[in-house]
Amino acid sequence: MFARRLAALALASSVAACASLAGCAAPAGEEEDPSVSDGSSTGDGTSEEAIVSEHSLVGNELPDHTLALTFDDGPGPRTQELAEYLAAEGIHATFFINGMHVPGHQAALDAIVGRGHILANHTQNHLQLTKLSAAKVITEVTQTDAFIQEVQPNGPWLLRPPFGAWNGSTAAAVNGTPMKKYVGSVFWDIGGELTATSAADWACWGKGVSIERCGDLYLQEIKARKRGITLMHDVHNKSVDMMKYILPKLKADGWKFASLLDVPSIKRQIANVSAATAAPDACSSSTLGRSVPAGSCVQSRNDTKWHRCDNKEWLDASGPTDPKCTGAKFPL
Ligand SMILES: [Zn+2]
């Protein structure tokens, strides 16, 4: 029972109502504001323990003046350019891709991983999962997982449902399959809605708001929130230009950039997933976003040094050829 509860935690649920049907049915880009989430819903007939609203993953515990950048709905024509630009600026971002956009853009996936960013799952066809059968939900996640597996075989495994639409039923469906390795549902703090004091890139472009004006609204919301996960859409060319417009201003103001794996709520969730699926002597690896068995050696993303898992603890290792590395080796 305990293990089952932890498995349910692996995919935190939160119900994000789709406020406007027109908006939801529109093509790539539309996302819902997480503030409309109603995680207290008991869903439609699923057990209570599959509904864990408090585990909606946002970035409000990041340090002051720290952002984790996320980009959805790609890969697009300029995703590779964006991945290279951010890497040159020393930033590790996360790209939540739709599998349907991968054909023709395979090089973008290689660039994302090759430049030290995280490739993450935004499902195959950008459908609203809460309106699909359990079988279709699993298909949507699994198809895009195949693309991610190919270029990022050691994880991490992060999931963001289209429109943020997620509930107990979708969580239970995914948790009943090998896709329960995913941590989610990953939300956002900044970039969810176009208002007088905040922006959502897709809404800006739909309403003819300029790159500078939209960027300034993002900056305004970022300053007001002080920290968090930002949401933009690399599938839109203007969003790439906007990122290049706001990044120098953020750096000049002293903002720092964290990986999504450094977001406290996501770190905790990864530990939960690891605890639910790992052997008792395994270690949780933040670099891989999952646990590994004792004897495994992992090269850390933070300091590029090697560490060996020894009965739930990480010890220094001399490198992948360390004789004590008796298990699998995971180079960066
Ligand atoms: Zn999306």
Image (cartoon, helix red, strand yellow):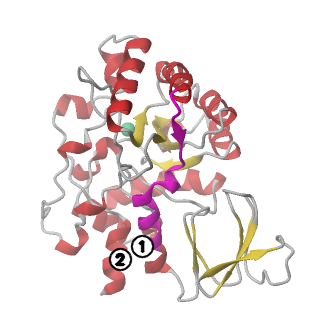
Is residue 107 shown above or below 260?
above
Q: Amino acid at mark 1?
A: Asn
Between residues 125 and 209, which one lies in front from this camera angle? 209
Residue at the spot of label 2: 6
The part of the image, by quadrant, that contains residue 204 is top left
Residue at the spot of label 1: 272
Q: Secondary structure at mark 1?
A: helix
Question: In x, y percent, where is residue 71?
Answer: 47, 37
Q: Is residue 28 visible?
A: no
Q: Amino acid at mark 2?
A: Leu
Q: Where is the C terminus found, in terms of image quarters?
A: bottom right
Ligand 1 within 8 Å of disc 2? The answer is: no
Q: Secondary structure at mark 2?
A: helix
Q: Quadrant of ligand 1?
A: top left
The residue range painted magenta reads: 253-273
Question: In x, y percent, where is residue 44?
Answer: 12, 63
Q: Residue at x 33, y 70 (%)?
A: 9
Q: Where is the N terminus found, in terms of image quarters?
A: bottom left
Query: CB under 8 Å between callouts 2 and 1?
Result: yes
Q: Is residue 301 left or right of residue 273?
A: right
Between residues 136 and 79, which one lies in front from this camera angle? 79
| Earlier residue among tags 2 and 1 | 2
